[in-house]
Image (cartoon, grey):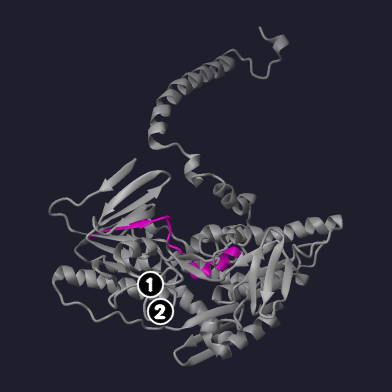
Amino acid sequence: MATTQQQAPGQRHQVVVIGSGFGGLFGTKALRRSDVDVTMVAKTTHHLFQPLLYQVATGILSEGEIAPPTREVLSSQQNAQVLLGEVTDIDLEARTVTSQVLGRETVSAYDSLIVAAGAGQSYFGNDQFAEFAPGMKSIDDALELRGRIFGAFEMAELGAVRGDNVDHLLTFVVVGAGPTGVEMAGQIAELAHRTLRRDFRAINTRTARVVLVDAAPQVLPPFGEKLGAKAKAELEGLGVEVILGAMVTDVDERGIEMKFKDGRVEVINTVTKIWAAGVQASPLGKTLSEQSGAPLDRAGRISVNPDLTLPGHPEVFVVGDMIALDHLPGVAQVAIQGAKYAAKEITGRIKGEPSQPPFKYFDKGSMAIISRFRAVAMVGKLRLTGVIAWLMWLAVHLVYITGFKNRVTAVLHWFVSFLGRGRSERTTTEQQIFARSALARLKRGAADLVSDPGAYDAARQLLETTRRAELEAQAAEEARLTDAGQRGVPAAERV
């Protein structure tokens, strides 16, 4: 069953924004004073502050603090509406966007389109690895990893009580030595060596092995050789084992296999693996490429014009991690600045103003936290490490957390975690760990767990009729028992 939104005669300029990440949210907000109607279509109901996902996975922050509801964020913007749904098709000729959620299909018409669908985890053609080594791109990923990490310590405690070898449970492998991998490895080390060291009786969490693996020859390649070496030394000081020049060739339930340049193969027995290596642009890039002829690079990013428009389609803007332009990095600032540029261009066109100069990215620097009081920062020609870089990291991330309430609670949690030993978000469930795998076994995913609209409506009337009769009979019996004074009276004594 499809719902179609079409533009009525005399209706204002319609802008559709795909995605609720940095590009989608900032693009929508930049149009708040424009004479347009904005429809944001996103597959989640929240705006995700992705750089802090690893803190959700390691129990520092709750998911709500880094993922506020998109509707709440945009509630005061009268010209914006939000539609839940994963975009499955873009028709450039008809100027429509088709989205779907649980079998319900919606078609939205546009005059201008901003595509900010972002990127997902790349397993370099080995998608089967995802079952055993989750990535770090969504709230679901972070909660599953939280369950796996804290669950590993719990299972190790049980195994140690029985006298079993628990080395594989106390071994944690992070694949990918970019910012996400470095931050994740550092926090797991802190968790094992500091936060949990008094919480267990049968195991010593300080003996946990944390391994960071990458095929590259250095840690944090985008930060340069000097900062990369500094980060590696800091990680090793925390007890993280850094293995470079090793390509992961196999991942299964029990461990991970690596191959070195000299042909040597090494296997690490570990239950908990985290994948932080590589990204792949949204499949919508391929959809746009097939219709426009714009080429894709190896990561699925699409080539765009200098003004961020799709070749041959000046009404379509592509921003953020999806674009291949001037070797722009896949960071939040590229998406934010690109979305604001696109919004300004759309507003200018409506007003009849001249086009802007080509998009130019302003690099505000890069930062990565290693552990408490340890970070590296690169701002222009400035290279910083240690406490100063760590404080800069805290300040910058605090600015971009959406919502005053979330900023306050994040500061409180950072205070507890970094100055103390506590992690306030350690609750985990089996559902968090196994739900994704269970859904993957269904032919249509979650859609198989709900009725199709037509079937639901047909069954509902029959259900209401039979259920009403049952409820009426149950209520009559409850009233009879009370009025007759028969509750708690043995059957032999009833009159």
What segment carries the magenta color?
A: 37-58
At 33% across and 52% down in the image, what residue appears?
98
Tell whether label 1 touches label 2 (CB within 8 Å). Answer: yes
Q: Amino acid at mark 2?
A: Leu
Instruction: Determine the image quadrant of residue 482.
Output: top right
Name the residue carrying label 2: 328
User: Along the polypeptide, which appears first: circle 2 or circle 1?
Assistant: 1
Residue 5 shows up from this direction: yes
Quadrant of residue 123 within the rendered picture = bottom right
Image vertical order of residue 82 relative to residue 369, above or below: above
Binning the other alpha carbons within 10 Å of mark 1 as few (below 14), some (14 to 19) or many (20 upward) gives many
* SS of the residue under disc 1: strand
Residue at the spot of label 1: 323
Q: Amino acid at mark 1?
A: Ile
Near mark 2 (Cα within 10 A), the count class, few <14, some 14-19 or many ≥20, is: some
Residue 263 location, x and y as percent?
70, 77
Looking at the picture, how far across and down is residue 300, in whole percent?
A: 43, 68
Residue 312: x, y in percent? 24, 68
Left or right placement of residue 243 versus residue 79 in this view: right
Residue that sits furthest to the right in the current view: 163
Q: Pick the quarter of the image with the C terminus.
A: top right
Residue 268 location, x and y as percent?
Answer: 73, 68
